[in-house]
């Protein structure tokens, strides 16, 4: 992956990016339910995602992504977070990375620019799957509750 240098820059600044996202989740009109989830519960998972981004993008299988984000959907459903707010939160996670890339990327040569575009495309695919799988987990919990 040509954008690996940028991925490593994201990982280096993972705490900063996660803190910006945490603030956004707790103040956005799109995610009011996240205000009731303790910061100490949210922060580690956000930092972990950003600090291990290379591993998520290059080494994790679709099954790994599915397992992680289905479990996230189950947790957020149990927390009482509406499905739309879960989708917003994941969208904001991706948007926070895009914002960082635009701020810090600064591609100076065509090959670097290509690497950044490749990274953005890879991030889009990853977060699109994350949203879908999280909603699968959310629906599983809802269906289990209805059956009980």
Image (tube, helix red, strand yellow):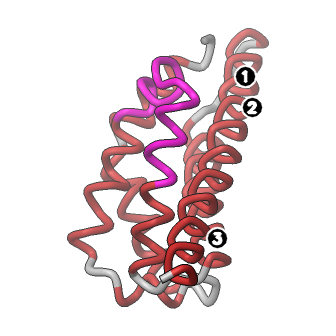
Viewer-side label of 3, 1: 3
Give the camera-side residue of 100 and 60: 60
Taking the view exactly as shown, the residue that stands out farthest to the left is 40
Examine the rendered structure and indicate whether residue 31 appears above or below residue 113. Answer: below
Q: CA distance from mark 3 to mark 1?
A: 24 Å
Magenta residue check for 64? yes
Displayed quadrant of residue 107: top right
Relative placement, left or right, of 142 versus 128 is left
Magenta residue check for 54? yes
Q: Which residue is label 2 attached to?
A: 121
Q: Which residue is depicted at the point 56% across and 65% down?
A: 140
Neighbourhood count class around disc 2 (C-alpha, 10 Å): few under 14, some 14–19, many 20 upward: few
Q: Which residue is depicted at the point 66% across and 44% down?
A: 129
Q: Which residues are magenta?
A: 52-70
Question: Mark 1 near mark 2, Cβ–Cβ under 8 Å?
Answer: yes
Q: Which residue is label 3 attached to?
A: 88
Callout 1: SS: helix
């Amino acid at each position: 992956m040509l954008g690996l240098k940028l991925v490593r820059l994201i990982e280096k600044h993972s705490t900063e990016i996660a803190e910006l996202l945490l603030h956004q989740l707790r103040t956005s009109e799109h995610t009011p339910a996240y205000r009731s989830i303790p910061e100490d519960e949210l922060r580690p998972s956000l930092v972990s995602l950003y600090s291990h981004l290379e591993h998520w993008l290059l080494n994790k299988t679709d099954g790994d992504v599915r397992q992680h984000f289905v479990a996230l959907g189950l947790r957020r459903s149990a927390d009482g977070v509406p499905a739309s707010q879960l989708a917003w939160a994941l969208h904001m996670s991706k948007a926070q990375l895009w914002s960082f890339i635009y701020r810090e990327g600064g591609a100076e040569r065509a090959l670097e620019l290509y690497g950044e575009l490749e990274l953005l495309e890879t991030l889009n695919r990853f977060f699109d799957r994350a949203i879908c799988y999280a909603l699968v987990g959310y629906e599983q919990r809802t269906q289990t509750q209805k059956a009980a």
